[in-house]
Amino acid sequence: MDFDVSGARIFFQVPTNIPVLGDFVISETLLISWLVMLVITLLCIFLTRGLKVEGISKRQALAELLVETANNFVRNNTGGNRFDKLIPFVSALFVTSVVSNLISLIGLRSPTADLSTEAAWAIVVFVMITATKIKTGGLGGYLKGFTTPIAVMTPFNVLSELATPVSMACRHFGNILSGVVINGLIYAGLAVASKALFGLINSTLAQIPILDIGIPAFTSIYFDWFSGVMQAFIFTMLTIMYIANAAEE
């Protein structure tokens, strides 16, 4: 997309010079996703180096606090330790989502502003939900569930089942992309206002987007920090609740 606001231009488009490895296209989203995974991996290595039983360091104390928080988060929302096996997956999903959402703060395009990222996460979650349902009630019980309460409801039940990953992916994607677009429009609007305001004083000052300095930081508190962390929390919470509910059916 390309917006033009009285001379201020904002670009939201995929570059045309994307590197290709055989039939495998290396997109900007993929590169930054690898960067996110690298950052998380290095952080985990840093926090878990030199673990001790006594006289632990502040780094180890932080690592233990994060692990305990993840344990409590899953257990408190599933009613016990029945789903402890989900803790590593849920923790990885939450951290990956948070880092991906907040990486835009350093000028990189957030991978979660690309629907393919959330779609991949949602598909994985959907497979886990389906596997849990089949494990709980058997394949026959899972298929029979589509005919509840009456057989004529089968098409609607199928659509409802497929709507789960779609709604999860689109909710997360929509909120992150809207933040990117709104922030871009704010920068563009401030650039236009700066040009008009300071152009009355000096033509040289009119070329410098002075109002873009500092002011967008306040909007970033919501669109980047709050919204980014909140969307990661919501996606993770829905993952836990859907899988836990599937085990009860």
Image (cartoon, grey):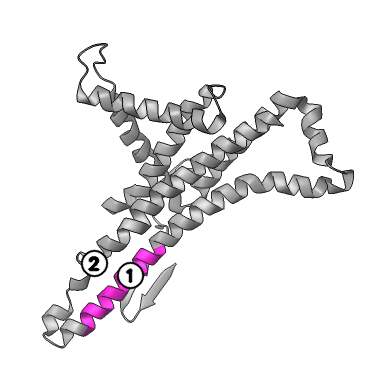
Is 208 placed above or below 62 here?
A: below
**Which residue lies at the image location 34% right of the left edge and 34% below the top edge?**
40
Q: Nearer the viewer, residue 65 or 90?
A: 65
Is 196 placed above or below 90 here?
A: below
Is 157 placed above or below 61 here?
A: below
Is 166 on the left-hand or right-hand side of 32?
A: right
Please report the bounds of the magenta region as a residue range. 181-196
Point out the tag, 2 or 1, that comes first from the N-terminus.
Answer: 1
Q: Amino acid at mark 1?
A: Ile
Q: Is residue 195 magenta?
A: yes
Q: Nearer the viewer, residue 110 or 12?
A: 110
Reading the image, the residue beneath label 1 is: 186
Q: Nearer the viewer, residue 198 or 18?
A: 198
Q: Amino acid at mark 2?
A: Ile
Reading the image, the residue beneath label 2 is: 215
Q: How many marks?
A: 2
Q: Residue furthest top?
A: 53
